[in-house]
Amino acid sequence: MRVKRVGLPLVNVVKLRGTPILQQLLLEERLLRSSSANWCIVNDGTNRPNIVMGLSGKPCELVELEPVIRDRVPFIKRFTGGGTVIVDENTLFVSLICNRNDVPDVQPYPRSVMAWSGSLYSQVFNGIGDFQLRENDYVFGDRKFGGNAQSITRNRWIHHTSFLWDYSESNMAYLKLPSRVPQYRLERDHTDFVCKMKDYIERAVFIEKTIKAVGTQFMLKELSLDEIDDSCREHIETTRLLTLDELKETLAKTTRSESIAQAV
C-alpha cells in the first residue's frame, strides 16, 4: 500500500487486470452506494467479450438479438445510464467514484462531471492526437475511442469510461445503430465512427498517465482488490446479467410485434 501527496482529498486506487466486467460493475455499484471513500478503479481489459447496456436500455433496440443469442454473448445491464458497448480484453476501463464535497468545483450534474473528466483526460492526452470531449464522448478528431456513463446520488457520483484500445469488427456487428446518436456521428456505422487508441498511445503509458492525472486532484492510496473492505451496509443492486431466456423472450415479442405491424 502506498500513499502519495498531502493536502488533497484521499482516493483509493485499485489496479485490476482482466477482471470480469460483471464483477467490476458489481464492485463499483457497492462502493458508490455503501462506501464513504473516493475510488479510482482501473481494469486493464476484461476476460471475455460482454455486451454492457445502460440501466434504461432495451435490448431489442440496441443489439442484434439473434446472433447475440446464437453466440451466447453475456449481456449485462449496468447500474449507470449511457449507451451500449461490447467490451473484451482490448477494452480499458477507468472508473472514478467521488464524494461531492471532495470535488467542490464539480456540480452533481452530468454536464459538470463530464466537463471535469474532460479536463482530467486532457492531461492524459496532452499532445496526443486531436483529443477532445465531444458531447459525451472522448474523441481523436471526429472518431470516438472512449464512451462514458454516470450515476449521481445525493452526495456521491461515479463517472466510468470504457476505452477502445483495440476492437474486433465482428464484435461491433452485434450492435445496432442506436436511435439517439451524437450529432457529430453523422449516421456513420460503428467502424467508421470509432478508432483504436493503440494507434495513439501505449497501453501501459495510458494507465500510468491516467493515475498521474488523478494524482493532481487527489492524494493517491493504492489498494489491492483483496484490501477492499467487504463489510458494507445493504444496498440496492441493479447491475445484473440478463438470462438467455430473457433475451429469447424479448426476441420473440419483438418478432411478433414486427409481424403484426407488417400485417396491418
Image (spheres, helix red, strand yellow):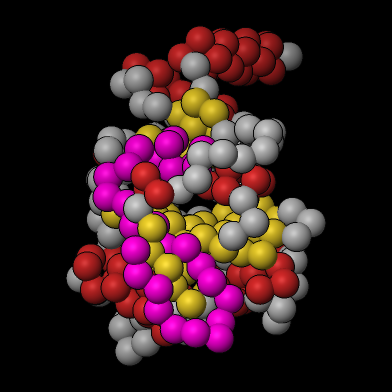
Q: Front-most of 40 and 260?
A: 40
Who's the residue at 28% across and 59% down the image? 165
Q: How many marks?
A: 0
Of the 4 image quadrants, the one containing the C terminus is top right
Q: 62 left or right of 109?
A: left
Q: Establish if 260 lies above or below 163.
A: above
The quadrant holding residue 77 is: top right
- Residue 184: image location, x then y, percent: 54, 68
- Residue 201: image location, x then y, percent: 24, 74
Of the 4 image quadrants, the one containing the N terminus is bottom left
Who's the residue at 40% across and 73% down the image? 3
The quadrant holding residue 87 is: top left
Q: Establish if 180 lies above or below 255.
A: below
Q: Front-most of 192 and 65?
A: 65
Q: 138 left or right of 235?
A: left
Can residue 232 be seen in the rendering of this structure?
Answer: yes
Would you say residue 204 sits in the magenta stretch?
no
Hey, which residue is sitting farthest bottom in the picture? 127
- Residue 2: image location, x then y, percent: 35, 70
- Residue 98: image location, x then y, percent: 61, 64
Can residue 130 be seen in the rendering of this structure?
Answer: no
- Which contiguous range is marked in magenta? 1-27
Q: Front-most of 178 and 10?
A: 10
Who's the residue at 57% across and 48% down the image? 31
Would you say residue 15 sits in the magenta stretch?
yes
Q: 167 left or right of 155?
A: left
Who's the residue at 74% across and 65% down the image? 109
Q: Front-most of 157 and 190?
A: 157
The quadrant holding residue 134 is: bottom right
